[in-house]
Image: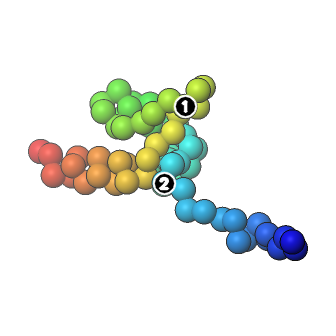
Amino acid sequence: MVRKKIEKSETKIECGFLSFSEAQEFLGISHQTIYNLIKKGLPSYKLGSKRVFIKEDLVNWVKSQKSSP
């Protein structure tokens, strides 16, 4: 059986999770602003010692904030 060597570009999988710094970049806000928004309800999850964000949750949360007075 011959195994095909998989190139890194072939293994790139779109991930719905964002790290803390990726979420900052995605939202275009500072480190402290993310912490403040988490206190106000920005959805995030702890995986071990890391905090992650689901991209779709961030988009939905921002949309819900725009419709609020």
Residue located 35% across and 37% down the image: 42
| Residue type highlighted by circle 2 | Gly
In this rendering, the answer to whether 5 lies above or below 49 is below
Q: How is the image coloured?
A: rainbow
Residue located 30% across and 33% down the image: 41
In this rendering, the answer to whether 16 lies above or below 36 is below
In the rendered image, residue 17, in percent from the top left (x then y), is placed at 51, 49
SS for callout 2: loop
Residue 12 horizontal side relative to residue 64, left or right? right
| Residue type highlighted by circle 1 | Leu
Which residue lies under the disc numbered 2?
16
Residue 39 horizontal side relative to residue 2, left or right? left
Q: Is residue 29 among the parts visible in the rendering?
A: no
In the rendered image, residue 34, in percent from the top left (x then y), is placed at 44, 37
Residue located 79% across and 69% down the image: 6
In the rendered image, residue 66, in percent from the top left (x then y), is placed at 21, 52
In this rendering, the answer to whether 42 lies above or below 13 is above
Q: Is residue 52 among the parts visible in the rendering?
A: yes
Which residue lies under the disc numbered 1?
47
Distance CA(mark 1)–CA(mark 2): 14 Å
- Classify the position of the C terminus by image quarter: top left
Q: Residue 59 bears which disc, if any?
A: none
Give the class, few, some or many, for how many residues have Cα within 10 Å of label 1's Cα (few <14, many ≥20): few
Which badge, 1 or 2, comes first in the chain's sequence? 2
- Which of 21/60 is in front? 60
In the rendered image, residue 55, in percent from the top left (x then y), is placed at 43, 52
Residue located 55% across and 62% down the image: 14
Residue 45 horizontal side relative to residue 9, left or right? left
